[in-house]
Amino acid sequence: MPEACDNTVAIAERCAVEFTESTGGYMARADVPAGETEESWFRKEVWRGIEARYPGERLDQEVKDRVEMELAIISQKGYCGYYLVVADFIQWSKRNGIRVGPGRGSGAGSIAAYALSITDLCPLEHGLFFERFLNPERPSMPDFDIDFDDARRGEVIQYVSEKYGAERVAQIATFGRLKAKAAIKDAARVLDHGFAIGDKITKALPPDVMGKGVPLKDIFNTEHKRYNDGGEFRSLYEQDAEVRTIYQTALGLEGQIRNWGVHAAGVIMSSEPLIDIVPIMARPQDGAVITQFDYPMCESLGLVKMDFLGLSNLRILEDALVNIKANKDEDVVLEEPPVRRPGDVRADGPR
């Protein structure tokens, strides 16, 4: 139906849509008590958590200096609400028996995150640097990687959807693109060549190294570091006119989007309805709301991603505790270890 292509273009030509790029302009807003701002409440919550994490003499000048340094940068960057929102759904998960990882990635270097129970690792004890997560010179958004029991990850996403508004929460699309071999096979098929010739050409392509092949456009590039690996394909190209036709067609297909999927962990939480910011869609099988842009494009429009990672290890730990209760009728309480600092001496001697 050639007219379908014409109609698609006709509709596209009637559309007039503009997108405004920003950084973090649509970050989800935290719930704070009356009379408080996100910044003032964030400071109070952090100091409340610090006093609980470092009781008595442990709240020394080093801790205080680190806290004030982080508070200044987080406030300057405008990320107080971001911390509060992340702390909210993590604390909800823990209250509802959903196991949460102790922290991974650069976010574990934040003592403010430790105070809010976003992480359970003391950055001072482990020598972790906050600047790897945030610093005044770094323009990119903060990004906590948070592990949840993979069997209950969906419950956390459901919670944030209900609390912050289903119209403001969405998962993120990803796009699979045609690589060299797939482009060759697709080109051979649409040009009505048999499977055999497409298979013959792809076998002549340079083999993948650590999962990466040589792009079609670089097979004839004498300056490419793997130029010598393409000798077999170049010989085939010179000898067979069909191969040349398929190659030229495949050049235009390589890199094109072939299919879409859903980001394994990313969830966007916005302060405004997403339908006003990006195109969205509902996944047919379950109705899950998903952006039609991938994350780099969403980020350029001011949207912020939260990573809700499903970790099977946490499910295994939970199952182990359930089985201990069933077999031994014993409740195992996983207590948080005491904070130790470099140079601390244990009362019960070295281990």
Image (spheres, rainbow, N blue to C red):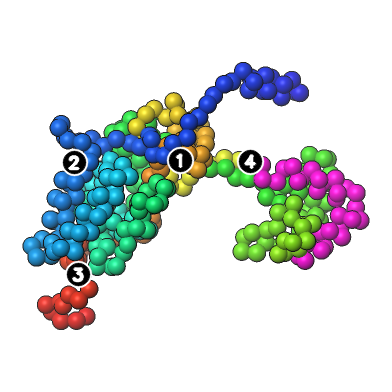
Among all residues in the image, which is located at the extreme front?
137
Q: Is residue 64 above or below residue 349?
A: above
Instruction: Look at mark 1 in the image and give the residue it sits on.
Output: 299
Q: Quadrant of residue 61?
A: bottom left
- Region in magenta: 228-257
Seen from the viewer's position, the closer of residues 150 and 210 is: 210
Seen from the viewer's position, the closer of residues 161 and 127 is: 127
Residue at x 33%, y 30% (from the top left corner): 165
Secondary structure under tag 2 reads helix
| C-alpha span from label 4 to label 1 | 20 Å
| Mark 3 or mark 4, earlier in chain | 4
Q: Which residue type does callout 2 highlight?
A: Ser
Q: Is residue 190 above or below residue 143?
A: above
Seen from the viewer's position, the closer of residues 333 and 42 is: 42
| C-alpha span from label 3 to label 4 | 51 Å
| Mark 2 or mark 4, earlier in chain | 2
Q: Position of residue 265 (x, y in %)?
A: 43, 47
Q: Which residue type does callout 4 highlight?
A: Ile
- Say whether residue 84 is visible: yes
Q: Label 4 near label 3: C-beta < 8 Å?
A: no
Residue 247 in magenta stretch: yes
What numbered label is drawn on residue 340?
3
Front disc: 1 or 2: 2
Secondary structure under tag 3 reads loop
Image quadrant occupied by the C terminus:
bottom left
Instruction: Look at mark 2 in the image and give the residue it sits on.
Output: 40
- Say whether residue 326 is visible: no
Q: Position of residue 167 (x, y in %)?
A: 38, 28
Front disc: 4 or 1: 1
Q: Quadrant of residue 10?
A: top right
